[in-house]
Amino acid sequence: MTEPQSARTAQWPHRWIAAGTLVLSAGLSWAASVNAPTSPVQRKPGQAPNIVILVADDWGFSDLGSFGGEIATPHLDALAQRGVRFSNFHTAASCSPTRSMLLTGVESHRTGVGNLRETTPRAHMSSPAYQGSLSQRVVTVSSLLKDQGYRTYVTGKWNVGSEPRNLPPQRGFDRSLVQGDTGSDNWDPAQRYLPHTDKAYWYEDGQTAVMPKAFYSSEYFVDRMIGYLNQDQASGKPFLAYVGFQANHVPVQAPAEFVAKYKGRYDQGWTALREARRDRAAALGLVPANTPMATLPTTLDWAAQDAQSQRYEARRMEVYAAMAEAMDHHVGRLVAHLKATGQYDNTVFVFLSDNGAEGSDYKMAQPWLWTQYTQDIDRLGSRGAYSIQGPSWASASNSPMNGFKFFASEGGIRVPMFIAGAGVHSARPIYTGLTHVTDIAPTLLDLAGIARPADLYKGQPIETMAGHSLRAALQGDHQPLRRADEILGYELSGNAALFKGNLKLVKNLPPLGNGEWRLYDVVTDPGETRDLQQQMPAEFAAMQKDYQLWADAHGVLPVPEGYNPVTQVAINTTMNYWLPAYGPWGGGGLLLLIGTWIVWRRRHRSG
């Protein structure tokens, strides 16, 4: 995201800022210019396929109907039924690193986006692996497709760098309307979802965008994409259309007509939902029957909640489901447009979530949220209201996986993904082999008949794509994509993993782990319930060595002693925004005042 800078950051009272940060951490339809569809495009036999990439934000493994969920997602499910679902597909556990890998086919540290800017330790910020923006050493799949005659468009969340060199026009997109930050309000484009910056940053074709006063994000992103497609339709060129939805990123918001559909649907609570989803996913062949599930320390006992709390929590999930269905509805509008213009049959569709469902409780942000939003139960989902899914419902969204967003457990990094459409055979509709977000870019190039670059692009050295093409799997070959001895490493904010064959070595920091390594067979035990380190000591030791070699080769740095991502957000917000915006006394003093008030309020309540 774009961050204001000020010379005032050079001098400031360290004690005020440090005290404020520590106390705070303790307490804390736009009307589109869419032309009416013209006559259908006439395609030549063998012409390169169109490509549509649909990225959902913070959807859990079983949120999609075709992955076991109860949420109505008929348009996405219809696409999934035409293609191949990948039941063992992994991303990073947060948005920016995943998007960097999706666009480049390169591992996130090598793209320069080894972490979110908000949670990056200050000590890491000088490292090339932790810049929070795409490195000049990577080339995007959009650039490669554009070079070969594709018209290229992106709408929605961008979040891989807002410097001029990293905005979409410099990364291979002909037209673009993007949100440069990690997210924003879904009804008011000017509203920040957290006070990380002075405003929400939007860009159109590389310039500051003039946004409508009000919109609904999923509708607006599809409107703009259809407008771009219509403008250049007469060219007859194939296109890349990348839609990065904000659904279901916080604040969780949805139109009232969608919310109303789910009234009472979640009154039985998160445990019952989690079990029902696990059983449906197993019946679909996505996970083994009777997959065991771990109960997370962050999941509350539904039966122990009083009636008022149960009703409020159920309403949160109703709004969450409505937001997902609303997104699916607008995906259906895009699909209908492609059918009406004769482009549907020659289009490849890729759908994925950027990471698992969001399990944060956002308590740290409550003082700011109270000044910006209402959280009244009767307003949840509407304009001016703020809702979250929360850790207990997130465990159900990720069912039957363990963990959630930001953590290296399967619930944080194993997500729904399918590829459907032109050139995809659905005779074997589920692929169970280990796959990764870095596999998408090489797959798209393969389907388009374009060779991936080796180590040079336009004479400049670049990082080599790490991923594998999924084309064989899309055509019915279900042999393992990766060799049994091939490793796939991962790290984000000190949470780490290494895959090798069916085994996964993983460690998480609190509250979902204690920083110690565990070993699981995630094919037979995707819920990560049976630690195998005692039964397989040789493999356990060897994979720890493999991880260290991988980490050294990819520039992974250990997090500082005592690192906490919530505290780090407070520190980075202070340094990057509050201090430059309000000066040393205003920034540090304000944080100290708010933090002290939070601590007093908690003690007052407990007493």
Image: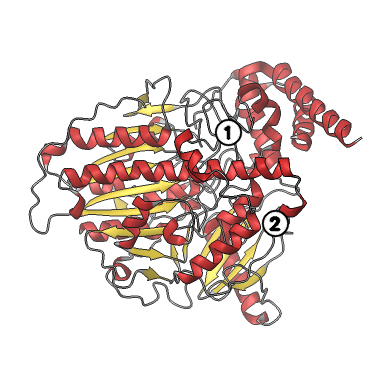
Contact? badges 2 and 1 (CB < 8 Å): no
In terms of sequence position, does the residue under pointer 2 or pointer 1 come before the other?
1
Of the numbered discs in the image, which one, if any, rests on residue 126?
Answer: none
Classify residue 294 by image quadrant.
bottom right
**Rendered position, 159 above or below 531:** above
Residue 28 on image: x %, y %? 74, 35
Classify residue 606 by image quadrant.
top right
Q: How far apart are marks 2 and 1 (CA)?
A: 28 Å
- Colouring convention used in this rendered image of the protein: secondary structure
Left or right: 138 as drawn, with respect to 593: left
Which residue is painted at 31% across and 60% down in the image? 443
On the question of residue 146 being in view, the answer is no
Judging depth in this view, the residue of 525 and 199 nearest the camera is: 525
The three-letter amino acid code for the residue at tag 1 is Leu
Of the numbered discs in the image, which one, if any, rests on residue 380?
Answer: 1
Judging depth in this view, the residue of 333 and 458 nearest the camera is: 333
**Rendered position, 226 above or below 460:** above
Judging depth in this view, the residue of 163 and 45 nearest the camera is: 45
Mark 1, secondary structure of its residue? loop
Residue neighbourhood size for the residue with mark 1, other residues' Cα within 10 Å, grouped as few (<14), some (14–19), many (≥20): many
**Rendered position, 95 above or below 274:** above
Which residue is painted at 44% across and 69% down in the image? 284
Residue neighbourhood size for the residue with mark 2, other residues' Cα within 10 Å, grouped as few (<14), some (14–19), many (≥20): some
Residue 395 on image: x %, y %? 62, 55
Quadrant location of the C terminus in the rendered image: top right
Q: Name the residue under label 2.
A: 512
The three-letter amino acid code for the residue at tag 2 is Leu
Residue 287 on image: x %, y %? 50, 70
